[in-house]
Amino acid sequence: QVQLVESGGGLVQPGGSLRLSCAVSGSIGSRSAMGWYRQAPGKERELVAGIGSGGSPIYVDSVKGRFTNYRDNAKNTVYLQMNSLKPEDAAVYYCNAGGVIDYSGRYYHPSAYWGQGTQLTVSS
């Protein structure tokens, strides 16, 4: 059984920073590829970032230069450091583990393993 637990969401002002964490436990190895997705009200879930087993990340254009995706394999945890937050970043953020990362296409294809989500609100 695979369990993903996200944490770190909250309310932040525009321009502020926040760090999300996703702790993974269960049958998925500590070096599995992982991804971050987000879903805003009325919108489809969209990819934000992904990271391979070796720690190389990919980002969608809208967050590139502002978000940093990194992992600590010893802690089985992936992090998403979010800086210069904008109102349009507000969403429920989900992590996914065990998917397939496509570096040439800069995409992460999710597996069936999702966390419960953590809410990010960006508002003054």
Image (cartoon, helix red, strand yellow):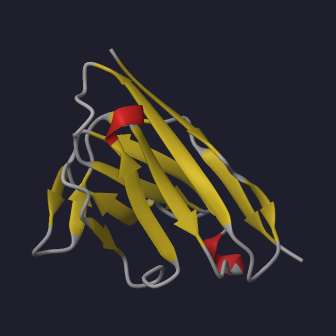
* Quadrant housing the N terminus: top left
Which percent across, then down, holds residue 117?
Answer: 57, 42
Image position of 107 (left or right of 36): left
Q: Residue at x 56, y 53 (%)?
A: 93
Q: Residue at x 69, y 70 (%)?
A: 17
Q: Residue furthest left?
A: 104
Q: Is residue 81 visible?
A: yes
Q: Residue at x 14, y 69 (%)?
A: 103
Which percent across, then down, holds residue 58?
Answer: 29, 70
Image position of 31 (left or right of 73): left
From the viewer's side, name the closer residue of 70 and 28.
70
Which percent across, then down, holds residue 73?
Answer: 32, 40
In the rendered view, would you say 53 is above or below 70?
above
From the viewer's side, name the closer residue of 82 and 122.
82
* Quadrant housing the C terminus: bottom right
In the rendered view, would you say 116 is above or below 36?
above
Which percent across, then down, holds residue 36?
Answer: 42, 55
Q: Is residue 41 visible?
A: no
Count numbered badges in the picture: 0
In the rendered view, would you say 2 is above or below 92?
above
State which quadrant residue 32 falls in.
top left
Q: Residue furthest right?
A: 124
From the viewer's side, name the closer residue of 41 and 109.
109
State which quadrant residue 121 falls in.
bottom right
Q: Residue at x 63, y 46 (%)?
A: 118
